[in-house]
Image (cartoon, rainbow, N blue to C red):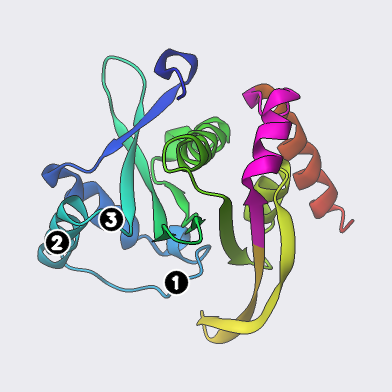
């Protein structure tokens, strides 16, 4: 289990009042255009009902708030673990949304993903973590590759949004590979941030 004091953020279960911030971010077109899901305009009442369901039903899907690890405990985003398959020990990593503009320098994103993956393998006892992202979203692709996730393939024209069909990359990380890289020190947050910066720079150069 991760030590909370080692990170600038922490994850916690949703609380009823979180629906207001989640609704704000869900209706932010700039945030939603980077996800694999379609943009949906969601009322606060619908958001409240959705969040209530996620709080009470967390067997197959676990939704978590991302909060600053300081006196404010400010919620800056949210993440999820979806489609938990307890038989085959596999989970869909969902996504990580950093909604607060002041925390989009990469640190909170990397820490949130690491803490979530650590939880998947160390607490849920899963064997396989997989995730999807738009082929065109180089930040997500660079992030997954920085965590040593392997690309399994490309789902051609599998998502329709912004008026056209998009290809989607599918990545996975196996339990044995996670612990090998962890033992080698590859999941040190600073090392991940350095790898991420290098991959983003190369992607911008078209390499």
Residue 193 makes an appearance in the image: no
Residue 41 location (% of width, % of height): 27, 72
Determine if residue 141 is in view: yes
- The spot of residue 106 in percent (x, y) is 58, 36
Could you tell which of marks 3 and 2 lies nearer the N-terminus?
Answer: 2
The image position of residue 204, as x and y in percent, is: 80, 53
Secondary structure of the residue carrying tag 1 is: loop
| Residue tagged 3 | 59
State how many labels appear: 3
Q: Which residues are magenta?
A: 171-189
- Tell me the residue that label 2 is attached to: 44
Q: Does dot 3 land on a helix, a strand or a loop?
A: loop
Identify the residue at image location x=62%, y=53%: 140
Query: Circle 2: is it few (<14), some (14-19), or many (20+) Cα within 10 Å?
Result: some
Q: Nearer the viewer, residue 202 or 1?
A: 1
Q: Nearer the viewer, mark 3 or mark 1?
A: 3
Alpha carbons under labels 3 and 2: distance apart: 25 Å
Pointer 3 and pointer 1: residues touching (CB < 8 Å)? no
Viewer-proximal residue among 21 and 178: 178
Dot 3, how many residues are within 10 Å of its Cα: few (below 14), some (14-19), or many (20+)? few
State yes or no: discs 1 and 2 in contact (Cβ < 8 Å).
no
The local secondary structure at tag 2 comes to helix
Quadrant containing the N terminus in the rendered view: top left
For marks 3 and 1, the one nearer the N-term is: 1
Left or right of 104 in this view: 55:
left
Name the residue at 58% across, 86% down: 164
State the separation of the CA atoms marked 1 and 2: 19 Å
Q: Nearer the viewer, mark 3 or mark 2?
A: 3
Q: Quadrant of residue 49?
A: bottom left
Residue to which mark 1 is pinned:
37
Work out whether mark 1 precedes mark 2 in sequence or the reverse, and give the earlier one: 1
Of residues 30 and 68, the one drawn nearer to the viewer in this rendering: 68
């Amino acid at each position: 289990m991760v030590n909370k004091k080692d990170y600038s953020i922490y994850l916690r279960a949703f609380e009823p009042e979180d629906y207001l911030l989640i609704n704000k971010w869900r209706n932010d077109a700039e945030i939603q255009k980077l996800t694999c899901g379609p943009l949906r305009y969601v009322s606060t009442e619908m958001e409240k009902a959705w969040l209530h369901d996620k709080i009470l039903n967390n067997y197959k899907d676990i939704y978590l708030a991302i909060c600053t690890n300081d006196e404010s405990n400010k919620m800056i985003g949210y993440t999820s673990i979806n489609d938990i398959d307890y038989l085959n020990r596999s989970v869909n990593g969902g996504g990580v949304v950093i909604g607060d503009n002041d925390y989009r320098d990469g640190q909170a994103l990397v820490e949130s993903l690491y803490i979530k993956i650590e939880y998947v393998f160390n607490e849920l006892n899963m064997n396989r973590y997989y995730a999807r992202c738009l082929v065109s979203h180089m930040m997500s692709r660079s992030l997954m590759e920085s965590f040593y996730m392997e690309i399994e393939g490309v789902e051609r024209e599998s998502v329709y949004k912004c008026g056209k069909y998009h290809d989607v990359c599918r990545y996975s990380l196996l339990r044995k590979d996670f612990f090998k890289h962890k033992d080698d020190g590859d999941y040190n947050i600073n090392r991940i941030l350095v790898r991420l910066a290098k991959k983003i720079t190369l992607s911008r150069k078209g390499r």
